[in-house]
Image: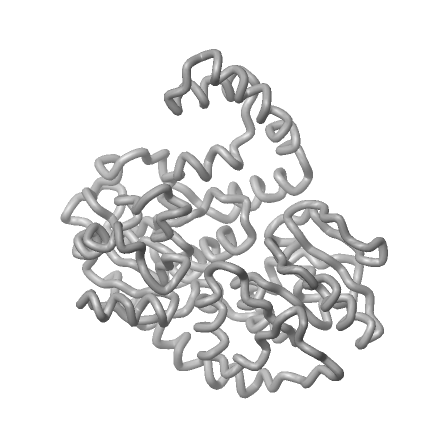
Amino acid sequence: MKIGILTFHYAHNYGAMLQAYALVTMLKDWGHDVKIIDYRVPSIEYVYQKRSFPKLVGFFVSQHNAFPIAFLKAIKYYPNERRKKSLKWERFEKFSQRYLPKTHRVFKPADITNDDVDVVICGSDQIWNAKITKGLNRLYFSDGIDSRIRRVAYAASAGGGSIDKANEQSFIKLCTNFNLISVREKSLSTYMNRLSIPNIVVSDPVFLLKKEQWKELAVLPAEKDYVLTYSFGEPQGFFDKALEIARLMKKQLICFSFKKKQLPKEIVQVYNGGPREFLGYFLNASFVMTNSFHGTAFSVLLNKPFFSVLPQNGGERVCSLLEKAGLSDRIIQPDTPISSISPIDFNAVTKRLSSFIDNSRFFLQQSIK
């Protein structure tokens, strides 16, 4: 069967690319012909596409700016384009080219035809987050796609437990495009039930693959036995708490991040890693502190003791996952006192999650028939 996936595959974001890789891999393992539908949200593509100065001017003109204004904006933002020549940028690009097979470029629903795919899967990631997509993006609801194509939402997320009131009626109507709907967060599922939109909760695609499959993909670092942080938009005191944990465990603290941060010199910073290096640093860590959903997910998947600090926005994602895993006690705040670190019984965690993951695989199998 020919399957197309609509997701945030183009973002140079570890969670975005790895969840896309997981869904592609699972479906290919079942014998399907799978490709990412190469649709890119303009605002996301702008952030990650490398442009020459003339192309940058052209981009701003295409955004309805007068030429003088477009020229001035290009001068302002061109230094960002030059930074895209970094090792990290190259690693993301190589990962995308090697592991994420894609269709031709798609710009509108009519570009997806019955000749291309039999099934369209929308998800996972925050494809229904109107803040990211600048309003509800109809393509991520398969709106306008050839009616002969089966349409499924898998582990779709809105980044929170509800849709903005101004978009609610549009959301209800858009959801009628799907044959079947599954979402990633319990809170979003409850909200959709109140709106009489049939759905079930499934796991993020990263849980569809086994630990051994992630190990095979990883590029291991030279460092071993350390405390790792993976975070963004950290609350005050986050790194103080991470240092406290590292000192308590008598281990080096390594910060794996998107860019260099202003941190104490005793913290080793890694900011040039791609998706495979991300996995490697998690695998070699003895402990993880994160405020990221996928940072939490891979800590659980790879059986790494961890603490999770809820992010300022989208904490429902982490809470929903840890509730399923029976690990809600691993949520802390930067001012939470820590005198000792209790171990995690990952055998018990695996048992709690196994039926949930099996049911998620079963939903995916049945939804594409």
The residue lying toward the viewer, choosing from 118 and 273, is: 273
The residue lying toward the viewer, choosing from 183 and 39, is: 183
The reply, left or right, for residue 368 in relation to residue 19 is left
The residue lying toward the viewer, choosing from 310 and 10, is: 310
Check the image and report above or below for 333 versus 36. below
Check the image and report above or below for 110 versus 185. above
The reply, left or right, for residue 130 in relation to residue 9 is left
Q: Quadrant of the N terminus?
A: bottom left
The reply, left or right, for residue 131 in relation to residue 260 is left
Residue at screen point 67% across, 45% down:
259
The reply, left or right, for residue 343 in relation to residue 113 is right
The residue lying toward the viewer, choosing from 133 and 280, is: 133
Residue at screen point 41% across, 75% down:
357
Residue 159, image x and y in percent?
41, 58
Rendering quarter of residue 213: bottom right
Counting every numbered tag in the picture gives 0
Residue 363, image x and y in percent?
30, 70
Residue that sits furthest to the left in the current view: 147
Residue at screen point 52% across, 32% down:
49
The type of colouring in the image is one colour
Q: Quadrant of the C terminus?
A: bottom left
Residue at screen point 81% across, 76% down:
248
Residue 130, image x and y in percent?
35, 48
Residue 208, image x and y in percent?
44, 68
Check the image and report above or below for 356 versus 369. below
